[in-house]
Image (tube, rainbow, N blue to C red):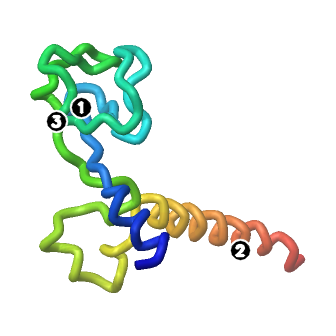
Amino acid sequence: MSEQAEQAMETPVLDRYECRSCGYVYEPEKGDDKSDVPPGTLFAELPTNWRCPVCIAKKTAFANVGPAGTASGFKENLGYGLGGNTLTPTQKNILIFGALALGFLFFISLYGLQ
């Protein structure tokens, strides 16, 4: 097996968890500096008395939002549409705001027709 394949097996994709109270996202790759949780600590491995560092909500107030960079939305709906459902949130933002900027530039270019 190649080294890249071995590294891919050793580093599983870690799910992120979002606080339903304030929107804080716990990312296992980063850990939690305020509670001295080292990077790489899974959400399930956090102590039961761990609290949200922003709003101090309990661990039960968090919902699994999946790994970073995955397509947003319900898995059963990702096959519908014109391919827009398979875009990650970052790609959707680039598409939306890029189209708005392009439309604005076209609008402003109308002043050059005088």
Q: Which of disc 2 and disc 3 is earlier in sequence?
A: 3
Is residue 57 shown left or right of residue 12?
left
Give the residue type at disc 3.
Ala
Disc 3, disc 1: CB below 8 Å? no
Residue 4, position in %: x, y?
Answer: 48, 71
Label 1 belongs to which residue? Answer: 19
Could you give the CA–CA distance between mark 3 and mark 1, rounded to whole angstroms? 14 Å
Whether residues under marks 3 and 2 lie with C-beta atoms below 8 angstroms apart, the answer is no
Q: Residue at x 14, y 28 (%)?
A: 61
* 33 relative to 70, above or below: above
Which residue does the image show at 18% across and 21% down from the upper left?
47
Please identify the residue farthest to the bottom as the structure is shown: 82
Which mark is on residue 106? 2
Front one among 15 and 92: 15
Mark 2 belongs to which amino acid? Phe
The number of numbered badges drawn on the structure is 3
Quote the CA–CA distance across marks 3 and 2: 51 Å
| Mark closer to the chain start, 3 or 1 | 1
Place of residue 85 in the rendered image (x, y in percent of width and height, measured from the top left): 31, 74
- Dot 3, crowdedness within 10 Å: few (<14), some or many (≥20)? few
> Can you tell which of label 3 and label 2 is closer to the viewer?
3
The residues bearing labels 1 and 2 have C-alpha atoms spaced at a distance of 41 Å
Tell me which amino acid carries mark 1. Cys
- Give the label, 1 or 2, closer to the camera: 1
Q: Are marks 1 and 2 in contact (CB under 8 Å)?
A: no
> What residue does disc 3 label?
44
**Quarter of the picture holding the C terminus:** bottom right
Q: Residue at x 25, y 38 (%)?
A: 42
